[in-house]
Amino acid sequence: MSTNKELEQVRKEIDELDIQLLALLNRRSELAQKAGKAKDDASIYRPEREATIYLKLKENNQGPLEDQQVIHIFKEIISSCRAAEEKLDISFLGPEGTYSDTAVKAQFGSSVNKSPTETIEDVFKEVEEKKSHYGIVPIENSTEGPINITLDCLASYKSNICGEIEMKIHHSLMGLNKALPKEDFEIHAHEQTFAQCRVWLDSYCPTVRRVVVSSNAQAALDASTEEKVLAIAGSLAAEQYGLDIIKTNIEDYANNTTRFISIGAQEVEATGIDKTSIMITTKNEPGALYKALKPIQQNNLNLTHITYRPSKIDKWNYSFFFDFEGHKEDKRVKSMLEELEAINIDVKVLGSYPKAEG
């Protein structure tokens, strides 16, 4: 009997807290709208402000909720408050159910208008033509390296990098039933996904035809209409297209991670936990890359990533993409950029933005 009374009392306290939380959430929404009206610019989304909020929440979290659970809850609260002003339009590589779709939610929360596109370049076009406020695109994978089309688009389009998201990628084999494929079956997936699952596929489906498609969600869509087609995709795609998961976690490396970036027209202010991405184009001459790297080293900047692409202007000329810690308005970063310009190296600042939450 006493246990029942205790339970009733706990439930009563929870109900009272829920009412208090509801009042506080509505008050927060009112204040967010006031702040929006008081801003000097029309930007509804401020990546630097949200990054600072999440950092403070982590610093003040005393549990039992884990930091990532707290961030997830507040991301949805902030997304809902933001939508009370105006819903953001976000483009991503579609159809719905891709990992890019999941990355949209991870970066902006659920209260947005999502606009799936057919290609990564279409995401850049939507943002450039102001059909979307922001876009989400993959830029590199921890096992397969850079996404070349994204690098080419960063070189060609004017959009700034406004943020980054790192997502663990877990691939599942799925279809209309739970049977492993036979020889007359096909497996559909994006080319990067096939590369990330090569060992498992060679071991368990060596003779099954592999068909490259534009996205894993497209693969899931194909599998939803044909019994002899299976797809490799994430669990969201299985839910989206009503497929049974045959085998989970078929990626070759358990720590398989994809880094996504958000792109937009705005420039992001410094937070103290920033990263900057630049592109430099060098001439085909001895020591060209060394000359470009020297100012980074001399200004004691932590270079976190480097890759390259053909410049597409002159043959055998290359564009190098550097990521390093710091904001373009930081003294050391400014000094480095000035030194690069002084030695006639073409530099394009792709954006400064808060580092992915770790």
Image (cartoon, rainbow, N blue to C red):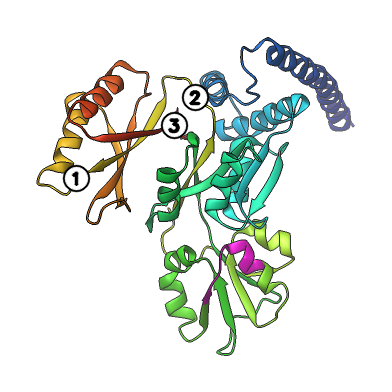
- Residue 290, image quadrant: top left
Residue ID for mark 2 = 268
Mark 1 or mark 3, earlier in chain: 1
Q: Position of residue 262 (x, y in %)?
A: 53, 39
> Mark 1: which amino acid?
Lys
Query: Image point 30% across, 48% down: which residue?
Result: 307
Residue ID for mark 3 = 355
Q: Nearer the viewer, mark 3 or mark 2?
A: 2
Residue ID for mark 1 = 283
Q: Nearer the viewer, mark 1 or mark 3?
A: 1
Secondary structure beneath label 2: loop
Secondary structure beneath label 3: loop
Left or right of 283 in this view: 238: right
Residue 5 sits inside the magenta stretch: no
Q: Which residues are magenta?
A: 211-220
Q: Position of residue 154 (x, y in %)?
A: 43, 44
